[in-house]
Image (spheres, helix red, strand yellow):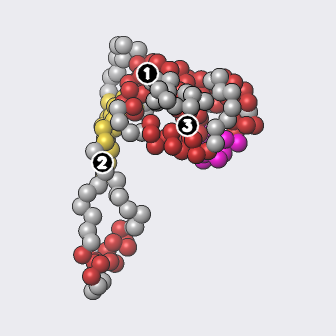
Amino acid sequence: MSQTSKSPRDVIVEAWLTAFNCMAAFSHRDSPKKFTQQQLFACVVLKNFLRADYRGLCRTLRDCLALAEAIVLTSIPRFTTFQKTTHRLLQGPQPKRLLDETVEQMLGRNPGIRTVAADFTGLACTTASGYCMRRRAKAESAWKTMAYHHFPKLGLVCDTSNHFILAFQTS
């Protein structure tokens, strides 16, 4: 059975240690070296844990300096730094390495998982609702011929005993 934490400090430190084990400190040798990728990743994890936006994350880190000190963050980045970091970290092989490291820390080398569940979901590429799309199909103008055939897909495999995500695949 997994143990979850309600402590923001525990969450940010655990995320920092996970990133420290599988991620380079800086994304480029000529980077400004003000913040490490591990620190920024830990802050983004904290943002998701607190269900805050990027500006709220900056305010939280300013108000609770103990959180910043826990990951050796000497100054608080601007909210755009977190936003750009999120987009950069979600591309390429980085998410897979982070998930693999998290699974290894959580379950160890011999996980002993009894049952898993897989879910594959197609996501819409538009903000238009199904109702709107049906209405557009009935219209007699030229723009009604537009159809959506391609959907980004996400597949997840998780442990059924604790809903811990073990693997993912996007396409």
- Give the alpha-carbon distance from disc 2 to disc 1, as whole Å: 26 Å
Mark 3 or mark 1, earlier in chain: 1
Q: Residue at x 58, y 46 (%)?
A: 80
Instruction: Give the residue number, with chain letter if any, for mark 2.
Output: 153
Residue in front for this viewpoint, 76 or 95 = 76
Mark 2 or mark 1, earlier in chain: 1
Magenta residues span: 50-59
Residue in front for this viewpoint, 14 or 81 = 81
- Give the alpha-carbon distance from disc 3 to disc 1, as whole Å: 16 Å
Tag shown at residue 106: none
Q: Is residue 82 left or right of residue 67?
A: left
Instruction: Residue at the far bottom: name it.
Output: 140
Please provide percent x and percent y for residue 36: 55, 27
- Quadrant in the picture for the C terminus: top left
Magenta segment includes 16: no
Question: Is residue 1 visible to us here?
Answer: no
- Give the alpha-carbon distance from disc 3 to disc 2, as whole Å: 23 Å
Tag shown at residue 22: 1
Q: Residue at x 24, y 61 (%)?
A: 149
Q: Tell me the SS state at disc 3.
A: helix
Q: Is residue 144 above or below residue 158?
A: below
Please provide percent x and percent y for residue 38: 53, 26
Residue type at tag 3: Val
Q: Residue at x 69, y 27 (%)?
A: 74
Q: Tell me the SS state at disc 1.
A: helix
Front tag of 3 and 2: 3
Instruction: Give the residue number, with chain letter if any, for mark 3.
Output: 44
Q: Residue at x 38, y 62 (%)?
A: 126
